[in-house]
């Protein structure tokens, strides 16, 4: 049982590792990039040309953007995935997490998505940081079948869809 997690570019690494390899048995992405094309078109002005240096100019290199995007390569994805996303995120817009979640649901892959009102790219509110940390532990406890210790009293379990 090996899991991976990460936020932002680390979230991309998480999603790409789950989409392109069979090393991990579950993963959790925090405001991670799922679609390089969507990032190129939807992100705020400061980051808008960032991918030109990492991937190549868009749309001239559109095929490479698709080739490297987790959301375009979910045919191999079969492990549980949890997504945490800020609704005010201007760097990785929330629609990327929603698209990833929707595709996982369509494929009956165990998945969870929690969106946070008032959060941007990264979580800043103490209660949301706590929720994400506890939520990730709860997600793994459900997926791997162990009892999570130390969760706060009254903790609301993460809703993992399609978990058998």
Image: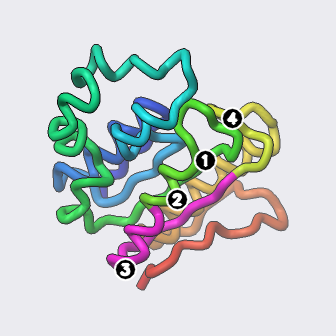
Q: Residues within 10 Å of mark 2 (few under 14, many from 20)?
A: some
- Identified at 44% across, 35% down, the residue is 41
**Residue beneath disc 4:** 120
Furthest residue to the bottom?
164
Tag 1 secondary structure: strand
- Identified at 48% across, 33% down, the residue is 8
- Earlier residue among tags 4 and 1: 1
Disc number placed over residue 108 in the picture, else none: 3
Q: What distance separates the C-alpha of mark 4 from that of mark 1?
A: 8 Å
On screen, residue 70 above or below 98: above
- Residue depth check, mark 1 versus mark 2: number of the one nearer the observer: 2
Q: What distance separates the C-alpha of mark 2 from that of mark 3?
A: 15 Å
Q: What distance separates the C-alpha of mark 4 from that of mark 2?
A: 15 Å
Q: Is residue 1 left or right of residue 100?
A: left
Disc number placed over residue 98 in the picture, else none: 2
**Residue beneath disc 1:** 85
Q: Give yes or no for contact between labels 1 and 2 (Cβ–Cβ under 8 Å).
A: yes
Q: Residues within 10 Å of mark 4 (few under 14, many from 20)?
A: some
Q: Give yes or no for contact between labels 4 and 2 (Cβ–Cβ under 8 Å).
A: no
């Amino acid at each position: 049982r090996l899991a991976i997690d990460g936020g932002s570019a680390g979230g991309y690494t998480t999603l790409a590792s789950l989409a392109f390899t069979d090393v991990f048995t579950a993963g959790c992405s925090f405001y991670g990039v799922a679609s390089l094309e969507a990032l190129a078109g939807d992100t705020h002005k400061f980051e808008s040309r960032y991918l030109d240096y990492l991937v190549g100019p868009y749309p001239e290199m559109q095929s490479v953007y698709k080739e490297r995007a987790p959301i375009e390569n979910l045919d191999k994805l079969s492990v549980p995935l949890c997504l945490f996303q800020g609704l005010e995120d201007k760097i990785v817009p929330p629609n990327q997490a929603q698209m990833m979640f929707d595709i996982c649901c369509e494929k009956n892959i165990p998945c969870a998505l929690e969106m946070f009102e008032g959060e941007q790219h990264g979580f800043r509110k103490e209660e949301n940081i706590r929720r994400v940390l506890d939520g990730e532990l709860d997600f793994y406890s459900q997926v791997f079948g162990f009892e999570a210790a130390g969760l706060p009293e009254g903790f609301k379990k993460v809703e993992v869809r399609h978990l058998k």
